[in-house]
Structures are given as structure tokens and as C-alpha cells.
Image: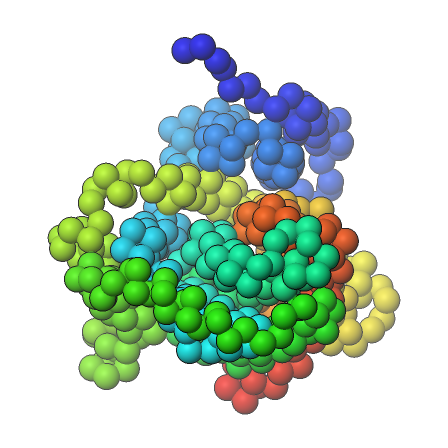
Amino acid sequence: MDRLTPVRRWPALISIAITLTIWFVIPTPVDVTPEAWRLLALFIGTIVAIIGKAMPIGAIAIVAIMLVAMTGVTHPGNSAAALKDALSGFSNPLIWLIGLSIMLSQSLLKTGLGARIGYGFIALFGKRTLGIAWALTLAETLIAPVTPSNTARGGGIIHPIVRAIAESLGSQPGNRENGSTGRYLALVNYNINPITSAMFITATAPNPLIVTFLAKGTDGVLQMSWGMWAVAACLPAVVSLLVMPIVIAWLYPPAITRTPDAPRFARQKLEALGPLALAEKITLAVFLLLLCLWAGVPAMLLGSGWSVNPTSAALIGLSILLLTGVLSWEDILKCRGAWDTVVWFAALVMMANFLSKLGLVGWLATGVGGAINHLGVHWSVATLLLILLYVYSHYFFASTTAHITAMFSAFFVAGLGLGAPPALLGMMLGFSSSLMMSLTHYGTGTAPIIFGSGYATLAEWWKTGLVMSVVNLTIWGVTGAFWWRWLGYW
């Protein structure tokens, strides 16, 4: 071995310093147990390490699991119980749902079905630049339920199609004239991603974590099923997806508005892919089966005895792909994103769960809620302030998972204390957790991939992100609230 891959020194030192300061220097508050305070020290240190990218997030998670086990913060004096607590996250079915779904999504890339879907929509709707933008939204929306890696979806599947289309139109990064068309498509490409991520539990990795927090924050009363989430999100999401390309065209108009050659280019790409292969047909059938199972169709048609757990459904789908040879075990072993997600998700879920059990989340929520309640405003205004504070604090995070893990539970419980209806508050915070991705060029994994293509400057990206955050929050806050009221959710 010629080279070591050391920890990034300064982020690691800052993380350690913050952990030790909270543990040893800052006095434990009166209403908090020493164990809860020490676990908070480890948790904040972990989040700081993730934000600073001291190591890959999976490696940080392993260290965090080790520290929880060795310090015994969850079970002082009982090392066996502390180890069991530290590893408890791996038994969470929702974590495995996301891991399995990432494995499933590999079939979209391997078979070429994802690219075929994208070019198919371009061929149908691509005569105008705005039509291309809506075609991209349709393509990503179609594959969103089965691609929980929003980075793989927006950056790995849709972005290469965007670049190919932009280049076919003669739009190159840095070109002030024709380059504006590529800029427009790149900004649309990215801003589809937060909206589709909000649409389905399985559309981005942290969504199941939100489901867990909502259930725990209401003692199991608010249980968001896959179908309930999808129905709640569909109307505001459709409005956002229709409006977003128009807003971006207003901000940064493309130089080319008519693209009569784009459908021909897309058809050439489809011809190169050839007829629908058997592997693509099997993949398509598996995804349709999964959508039916996740949406609870068997239970609706045949009774509750036929309901299938979402994680079990994912296992069924992956098993079919393995048995038919669409995916091989080597493909699964090479799926680093899935295994990485399972590891870091398990660590963060475990720490968040025990912070709640030890009473820390309730204490934090009381503090946040008390500060807002001190203003003496109606619960609706207080909830709006809470959501705005939650969303725009994402400027300080390079990971939606880190942000959600650090803040969601406390803000949800604080909102409940302010008198907000649980379902309304939970859905607004939950959907906002994806919508806030739009803000920066580092807000989620998709951002640096698309920003790195060079079509948009930093100022253009941040301006678009800020405007779209306001537009999306308004649409989801107004349209969503009326929609959820009509559905009887609150």
C-alpha cells in the first residue's frame, strides 16, 4: 500500500473539539440527564464531521456506532446492552427499504430503460425548449418512485440526457448566447429533483427517516404509508412541476425557444438503443409490480390480509431481477451507494432514536417552541416561522440527511407544542425537507454534478434556488393545505 487516505484534519479536529466541549465543558441542563447530554455531544460531533466531510459518511457512521457502544451512553455499565443499542439501527425495515430500492434502481442504468424513458419523452414533447423541460420533468417523475437516490436519478440518468440535448442545440458552457439554452436546461434539470424527491417515500433516501420521526413524535398516531404520502404530494407536486420551468424561463430565458430538431435527435438515440430488450421488459414489469404493492393495491382489491410490507415488496422485486438475470449478485455487490446508505442511515437513525428516548428531543423542542411562542402569534404564523427557519437553515448543510437528522424531530415536536395540526405540520416539514434542496450548489448530491457541468454561474444558481424555494413553499403551503384538508388528513 503506497498511500494512506487520512482523515481531513481540520473538520475532524473541529468535530472532536465540539464533542469534547459539550461533553466536559458545557454544564448539563437541569432537565436533561447526563446520558442524553453525552449522546447529544456524540451526535453533534457526528453531524459536524458529516458537514465538514472529515471522512466519507459511511466511515463517520462506523466511528459513531463504535463510540456509542464504547461510551455506554445508552446503557451505562452494561457493555453488551450498549453494543446492542449501537447496532439497533440495522434492524429498521425502512433503512433496508432504501438500500434495496437503490439496488433495484441499478437495473434502470444497466438495461438502458432510464435513458429510453427520457429520450422517449423528448421525442414526444421536444419541439420547443419549454416542451423539453416538461419532458424532462415527466421522465424524472416516472422513475422517481423506484430511484431513492435522487443523485442517481437527477445526476446519473437525467443529466447526461440534458447535456446531450444541449450539445445537439449547439449550446456550450460559458457561451453567452447559445449557452443560455444549456443554462436553462441545467437549472430545470436540477430543480426537478427537489420536487420529485418530495413526491414519494422512496424518491430520496431520508424520506423514510421522516416517516419514522413523524410516527415517534405522535406516539404512532401519524403513520404515513407509501400511498398516503404519494396522494398527499401529487397535487402540489404537479403544480410545482408545471410552474417551475416557466419561472426559470422568466429568470433566465433560453436563447433557443423552438427546437424542431430535438425530437429527431431523441429518436436517433432511441434507434441506437434498439427495440425494447427482454431485460428492459422484465425491469418495467417489476417496477409496475412494485408500484402496485407500495400503493397497497392488493389490500384495496382483496382485503387487508393481502397487504405487503414495503420492504418485503422491495425484496420481491430484487429477487425477481436476480432470478431472471437482469441483475447479477456482482451488480449488487458493486452497488456501493446501497451498502453505504444502509450503514450511515443505521447510525443516524439509532442516535436520533435514543436522543428521543432519553428525552433530549423533547427538551430541544420545548426551547424552540418557547422562543416562538413568546412572540404571542397564532399557531399558523408560528408554524410558518418554524418552517421558514427549518428550510433556510439548509444554507448551512451540505447534506439533507444531516439536516433532517439534526433538526426535524425537534422542530416537529416544537410545532405540535405551538398547536399546529400534526398531519399538516408533519407534511409541510416532510415535503419541505426535499424542497429545500433547491437553495445551493451543495444542498444535495445532485447539485455538484449538474453545477459542475458549467452552464450556470454560482450567482445564477443561488438566485434560481432562492426564487424556486419561495415558489415551491408557496405552492405546497397553499395548494397543499387545501388539498390535505379536502382529503381529510387534518
Q: Is residue 278 left or right of residue 344?
A: left
The residue nearer to you, when weighing 346 against 182, is 182
Give the side of residue 394 with respect to residue 151, left or right: right
Q: Position of residue 313 (x, y in %)?
A: 26, 62
Classify residue 273 as left or right of residue 186: left
Quadrant of the snapshot with the C terminus: bottom right
6 shown above or below 380? above
Residue 461 image offset from top left, x and y in percent: 70, 56
- Residue 422 in view here: no
**Quadrant placement of the N terminus:** top left
Q: Please provide percent x and percent y for residue 297.
A: 28, 78
Q: Is residue 54 above or below residue 138?
A: above
Is residue 475 shown to the viewer in this render? Answer: yes
Q: Residue at x 26, y 43 (%)?
A: 331
Query: From this viewpoint, which residue is outermost toward the top?
Result: 2
Q: Which of 314 and 196 is in front in this view?
A: 196
Q: Nearer the viewer, residue 111 or 104?
A: 111
Residue 418: percent from the left, percent from the top? 71, 68
The image shows residue 156, relative to residue 475, as above or below, that is above
Residue 7 lies, with reference to residue 330, above or below; the image says above
| Picture mark count | 0
The residue drawn where x is 20% and y is 45% is 328
Based on the displayed image, in which of its 4 quarters is residue 330 positioned? top left
